[in-house]
Amino acid sequence: MKHVLFCLLLAGSVVAQAQIRNDELVELTHMNQSNVRTEISIPGFDGYETLKCDFHIHTVFSDGSVWPTVRVTEAWQEGLDAIAMTDHIEYRPNKNVVIGDLNESYKIAKKQADKIGFILIQGTEITRSKPLGHLNALFINDANVLDVKDPLVAIDKALEQGAFIQWNHPGWPDDKSTLYPVHEELLKAGKIHAVEVLNYMEYYPIAFDWCNQYGIAPMANTDIHELISGDYRWGGGKMRPMTLVFATDRSEKGIKEALFARRTAALFDGKLVGKAEYLMKLIQSSLKIRRINDGTIEVTNTSDIPYEMTNGGKLYFFPCRKTVRIGIPKEGALVFENCFVGMNQKLSIPFEWWSSIL
């Protein structure tokens, strides 16, 4: 009887995970992961939602290897909230094979984005040699009019469309992160709004200081050309680079407002770069403290960002979504080793902040 019952339960389990079309075909629907999303837990604060975004992406319509709809699907699957389609203007090695104008990749991807309720931003990459280098124009409505000889004219034409201008990978391709006179002029004129402090798998420490000096937003993006799964593996605080946007609501309008207000942080390789006020609030929203007794506390990290903290010569590590029991830190600053507010400046929080939440 037990054997019969076991067989019935096993059969029921198989049926529950399969769809029987007829006597000759059973479809294993549970094996299809295309509609499964990995959620990234990063809390908001002060009424802002923390949106996970990638503002630098390529497809076959420039020098990428995938179709535009794939970029939308893989971003949704990996837990992102928004991406920008930013194919090159001047560099399109596939243009004789893949037919379409400079807006085509966005138009194709937008249909998929609307279908699954995903935020897609129209953009493009102005692609010139140094000293100017590469810049993304985000929130445009027509990339074709930016295809002009003078890149400064292209920037102006993007700004006429209400574009947000991001300076891309300042240390590429010569391994020198140089702020040229053309950048200084654009920054002083308010024509560059952000800089990639990380691009793909390299970051540019001096760009941390440029964000403070010129009041521009720090960004971290993949600049992905191949399949995202081929370059990055998710887990343990390690995930694709992303720009965290602290937005009033989950919408393209909300993201645009937040970017122009410079409410961003760059997240990559378990590191955060941003303004001290935003990083402090993010940490406070992520770490939940419970006092056990006069000498011991529990710290629960509710987020998917790991935190490393030093105090009094001791290192404390708070892994993603785990609780750690530690002795109450001593008097003195709390230094978060993986949070940067400048080139050689880590986030330092007065002990009074810690004691106030105990």
Image: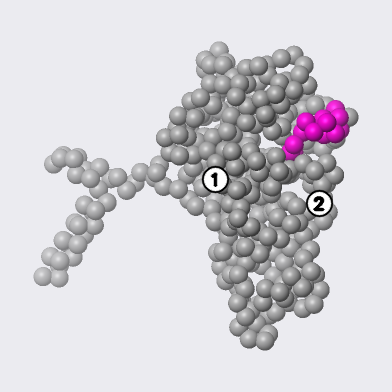
In the rendered structure, the answer to whether residue 144 lies left or right of residue 337 reads left
Callout 2 crowding tier (Cα within 10 Å): few <14, some 14–19, many ≥20: many
Residue 230 seen anywhere in this rendered image of the structure: no
Q: Which mark is residue 27?
A: none
The residue under label 2 is 342
| Residue at 73% across, 51% down | 274
- Residue 22 in percent (x, y) is at 15, 40
- Residue 141 in percent (x, y) is at 60, 24
What is the residue that sits farthest to the right in this orientation? 181
Q: Is residue 343 above or below residue 75?
A: below
User: What SS does tag 1 mark?
Assistant: loop
User: What SS does tag 2 mark?
Assistant: strand
| Residue at 63% across, 38% down | 256
Residues rendered magenta in the picture:
182-195
Q: CA distance from mark 2 to mark 1?
A: 29 Å
Indicate whether residue 191 is drawn in magenta: yes
Number of numbered callouts drawn: 2
Q: Is residue 61 above or below residue 314?
A: above
Residue type, mark 1 in image: Arg
Q: How is the image coloured?
A: one colour
In the rendered structure, the answer to whether residue 83 lies left or right of residue 206 reads left
The residue under label 1 is 250
In the rendered structure, the answer to whether residue 21 lies left or right of residue 353 reads left
- Of the 4 image quadrants, the one containing the C terminus is bottom right
